[in-house]
């Protein structure tokens, strides 16, 4: 086990984005108070905050003024949270609990949950493109960051992966289907977080490619471990319904490859991710530790 205090590290960066949410996500009109409450409910529902931590960690390879990255790290978490709200809906995964709490639609109703997700999705791009929030971001960085986030989370990324995931529940799925689902639904956003650090830190095109590939590998490993934990952990340990993947006939790595082979695949991906970081010095250590954490985590 690593001696690196990953819980403290994730907590530190998580608090940075929560402080941003607290200031930025205040209700601005009585007519939308309920919507604001629903958006804040899921934003402040906890979670590992690994996506913001990846943004900060990758950015830290190149620059040390971390406040510059905060609006972008927060925007990524907003977009991720929107996806969780929608994933939990009865029309999709139909989950009652998320991070140990009732899911958004269980508290606020389906219609408000859908709109809360919509609000967080659009708010993410609002935050990224707000010149007052981002005085040190060049127009070129802003456009590249927004474009690549849209690409990573739309029909060519996360949304496309979710559609394939739902389609797989209707019948047969194979290893290629599982690869497509996981690389699109999970890996592409995590890869974007890593590439974003290079974009904000004025990294080279090779830096962007290298960190993107690192992110793709840890993202796929992250999802494989998630699939395994759904089988081997309890609802209390996970903070969500354990066994729901099996119950819903989800396309997962263990369903195709078994638990042992799936774990070996995750370990190989982490080895490849660490090799991609070999060109960097100590400033990349947090990225290395996150990769190790992904394979070691228990929830």
Image (spheres, helix red, strand yellow):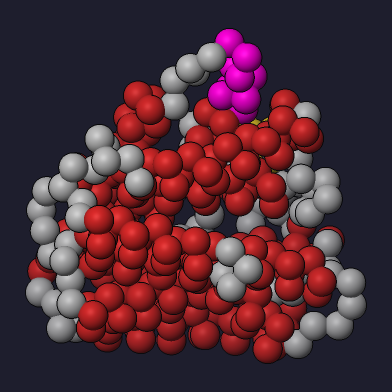
**Any part of residue 106 in sight:** no
Please determine whether, in this image, residue 31 is positioned above or below residue 75. above
Percent coordinates x, y for residue 189 in the rendering: 47, 64
Q: At x 77% / y 33%, what residue is drawn?
A: 111
Q: At x 69% / y 47%, what residue is drawn?
A: 86
Percent coordinates x, y for residue 182 in the rendering: 60, 73
Q: Is residue 204 left or right of residue 72?
A: left
Toward the front, the furthest residue is: 139
Q: Is residue 228 left or right of residue 65?
A: right
Q: At x 32% / y 69%, what residue is drawn?
A: 195
Locate residue 175: give its quadrant: bottom right
What range of the chain is rendered magenta? 30-38
In the rendered picture of this protein, how many numbered marks are placed on residues?
A: 0
Please determine whether, in this image, residue 92 is positioned above or below residue 224. above
Please determine whether, in this image, residue 93 is positioned above or below residue 291. above
Percent coordinates x, y for residue 156 in the rendering: 59, 73
Q: Is residue 219 magenta?
A: no
Q: Is residue 193 left or right of residue 167?
A: left
Please determine whether, in this image, residue 100 is positioned above or below residue 287. above
Locate residue 259: give its quadrant: bottom right
Q: Nearer the viewer, residue 203 or 251?
A: 203
The N terminus sits in image quarter: bottom left
């Amino acid at each position: 086990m690593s001696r690196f205090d990953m819980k403290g590290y994730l907590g530190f960066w998580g608090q940075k984005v929560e402080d941003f949410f607290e200031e930025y996500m205040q209700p601005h009109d009585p007519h939308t108070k309920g919507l604001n409450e629903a958006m804040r409910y899921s934003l402040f529902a906890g979670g590992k905050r690994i996506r913001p931590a990846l943004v900060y960690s990758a950015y830290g390879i190149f620059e040390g003024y971390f406040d510059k990255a905060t609006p972008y790290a927060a925007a990524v978490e907003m977009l991720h949270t929107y996806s969780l709200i929608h994933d939990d809906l009865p029309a999709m995964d139909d989950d009652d609990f998320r991070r140990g709490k009732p899911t958004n639609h269980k508290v606020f109703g389906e219609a408000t949950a859908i709109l809360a997700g919509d609000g967080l999705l659009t708010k993410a791009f609002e935050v990224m493109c707000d010149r007052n929030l981002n005085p040190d971001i060049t127009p070129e960085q802003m456009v590249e960051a927004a474009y690549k986030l849209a690409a990573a989370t739309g029909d060519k990324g996360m949304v496309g992966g979710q559609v394939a995931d739902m389609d797989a529940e209707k019948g047969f799925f194979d290893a290629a289907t599982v690869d497509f689902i996981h690389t699109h639904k999970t890996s592409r956003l995590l890869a974007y977080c890593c590439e974003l650090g290079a974009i904000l830190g004025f990294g080279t095109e090779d830096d962007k490619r290298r960190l993107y590939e690192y992110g793709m590998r840890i993202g796929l490993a992250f999802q494989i471990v998630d699939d395994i934990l759904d089988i081997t952990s309890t609802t209390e340990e996970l903070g969500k319904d354990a066994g729901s993947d099996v119950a819903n006939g989800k396309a997962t790595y263990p369903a195709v490859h078994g638990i042992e082979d799936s774990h070996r695949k995750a370990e190989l991906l982490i080895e490849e991710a660490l090799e991609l970081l070999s060109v960097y010095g100590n400033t990349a250590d947090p990225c290395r530790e996150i990769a190790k954490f992904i394979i070691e985590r228990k929830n």
